[in-house]
Image (spheres, rainbow, N blue to C red):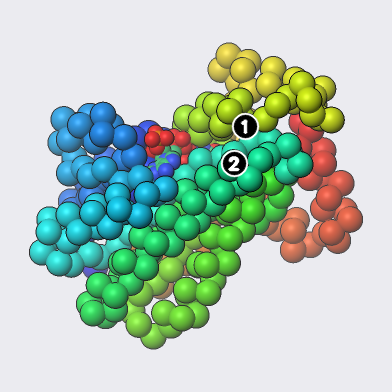
Amino acid sequence: MKKNHSILITGCSSGIGYQVAKDLSERGYQVIATARKSEDVERLKQQGLFSLQLDLEDSTSISSAFKATLDYTDGRLHSVFNNGAYGQAGAVEDLPREALSKQFETNVIGTIELTNLAIPIMRNQNQGRIIFNSSVLGLIALKFRGTYTASKFAIEGFADTLRLELHGSGIHISLIEPGPIATKFRANSYTMYQRYVDRDASIFRDEYIVSEKRLLKKGAAAPFTLPASSITPKVLHALESKTPKTRYYVTKPTYALAYLKRMLSQRALDKLLLKISDS
Ligand SMILES: NC(=O)c1ccc[n+]([C@@H]2O[C@H](COP(=O)([O-])OP(=O)(O)OC[C@H]3O[C@@H](n4cnc5c(N)ncnc54)[C@H](OP(=O)(O)O)[C@@H]3O)[C@@H](O)[C@H]2O)c1
């Protein structure tokens, strides 16, 4: 496989999307680094990346970014890295409909809408790679991450279905399953928690206060956190291998929890997940 293939990446303003866009660009890929906000698009352009505005909550933004991508690539598109997403924190019972629908619009519906634009182009080429950035929370659940977890379980379901529906088409589907990665993810998650959760009215008030303290502790990172650059080799394998994997685990917690999910009874797994949720 040649390295100068085109790849559209969502959510390149920071974190994993930004890192992978830079790394692939340095390796000779034709990267279309998309971001939700115009100021981020400008910053990415100044850094020498080809960048377009793409807001996953907005169908018009998705279709015009896709059209501009095809103009740039002469109608071809080798791959899509569905990376853009955020984590809505808060207990399931504390979140209003608006928070649920916003989470699913971004993490699931916009992502699949974009993927569905890419599939016919890839079918015509008889090849393509579609990579979803899922999460360890696409494999197991934790307290106070239910909405995000459900969105990543949905992505896992779509990816597994697409793999069957695209069988024999030359289009490969892969999922990346990161554990904790050092990005703005936690800070962005905290903003969305503050927007939608009425902490003082919640039955979980005391637990929220403990998690807030943990989140806001300067320099605090979850155990076994890896840098965003740890995702690049997995994306490269999904792009370049003749036999890309269905799932790429990243970080020790993902490997361990995926294994334990297979080995433990649900009751035993829940005990462990309760401990992890509260740690
Ligand atoms: N960091 C982790 O520990 C971790 C673990 C497992 C999985 N992941 C997954 O990794 C991916 C990247 O997250 P990250 O860790 O790099 O966090 P990040 O630094 O917060 O980056 C998230 C990116 O998604 C973008 N995004 C959010 N809403 C969007 C929308 N409506 N339209 C388009 N883009 C949108 C953000 O743009 P704005 O700057 O405009 O908000 C940002 O560019 C996500 O899919 C996340 O679920 C992360």
Disc number for residue 196: 1
Looking at the image, is 78 positioned above or below residue 105? Answer: below
Looking at the image, is 164 positioned above or below residue 49? Answer: below
Q: Nearer the viewer, residue 105 or 26?
A: 105
- The residue depicted at 35 percent of the width and 82 percent of the height is 169
- The residue depicted at 61 percent of the width and 58 percent of the height is 153
- The residue depicted at 35 percent of the width and 45 percent of the height is 55
- The residue depicted at 63 percent of the width and 23 percent of the height is 215
Looking at the image, is 50 positioned above or below residue 182? Answer: below
Q: Amino acid at mark 2?
A: Ala
x and y, in percent, of residue 199 in the image = 73, 24
Q: Quadrant of the N terminus?
A: bottom left
Disc number for residue 78: none
Q: Amino acid at mark 1?
A: Tyr
x and y, in percent, of residue 46 in the image = 16, 30
* Circle 1 crowding by C-alpha within 10 Å: few under 14, some 14–19, many from 20: some
Residue extending farthest to the front is 97
Callout 2: helix, strand or loop? Answer: helix
Taking the image as four quarters, which one is ligand 1 found in? Answer: top left
Q: Identify the mark nearer the N-term, 2 or 1.
A: 2
Q: Which residue is tagged 2?
A: 99
Residue 2 seen: no
